[in-house]
Image (spheres, helix red, strand yellow):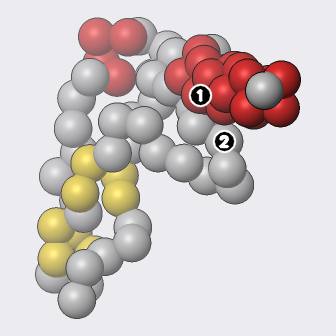
Amino acid sequence: MPLKQASSVFHLHTGSAKRELHALLNGQRLNHDHFPVYLNVTPDRALSFKTHLSKKTAFSESICIFLSH
């Protein structure tokens, strides 16, 4: 059965944020997720939310284009 849990690293030192954790849960290794989604928000390594904002901007632009036609 696939796990829904995943590990991610957020760190003030961006070089350390690239590391992947090797964590186990009930004997199964957790997958590493570079861009996790939590409560429909996508934080990035530096917690600047650039990834989240670019996704939401692209979505909003596509809605505007759809509505304008």
**Disc 1 on helix, strand or loop?**
helix
Q: Nearer the viewer, residue 1 or 18?
A: 1
Q: Which residue is mark 2?
A: 41
Q: Is residue 65 above or below residue 31?
A: above
Q: Which residue is mark 1?
A: 55
- Kind of residue at badge 1: Lys
Q: Which mark is residue 4?
A: none
Q: Outermost residue toward the bottom? A: 1
Q: Residues within 10 Å of mark 2 (few under 14, many from 20)?
A: some
Q: Residues within 10 Å of mark 1 (few under 14, many from 20)?
A: few
Instruction: Evaluate if marks 1 and 2 touch, with contact meaning CB atoms under 8 Å apart.
Output: no
N-terminal-most mark, 1 or 2 = 2
Q: Position of residue 41 (x, y in %)?
A: 66, 42
Q: Nearer the viewer, residue 23 or 39?
A: 39
> Is residue 47 at least partly visible in the picture?
no
Image point (31%, 76%), residue name: 3
Q: Position of residue 57 (x, y in %)?
A: 69, 20
* Residue 8, quarter of the rendered image: top left
Q: Position of residue 36 (x, y in %)?
A: 47, 45
Image point (41%, 10%), residue name: 13
Numbered disc in front, either 1 or 2: 1
> Is residue 69 at least partly visible in the picture?
yes
* Residue 25, quarter of the rendered image: bottom left
- Kind of residue at badge 2: Val
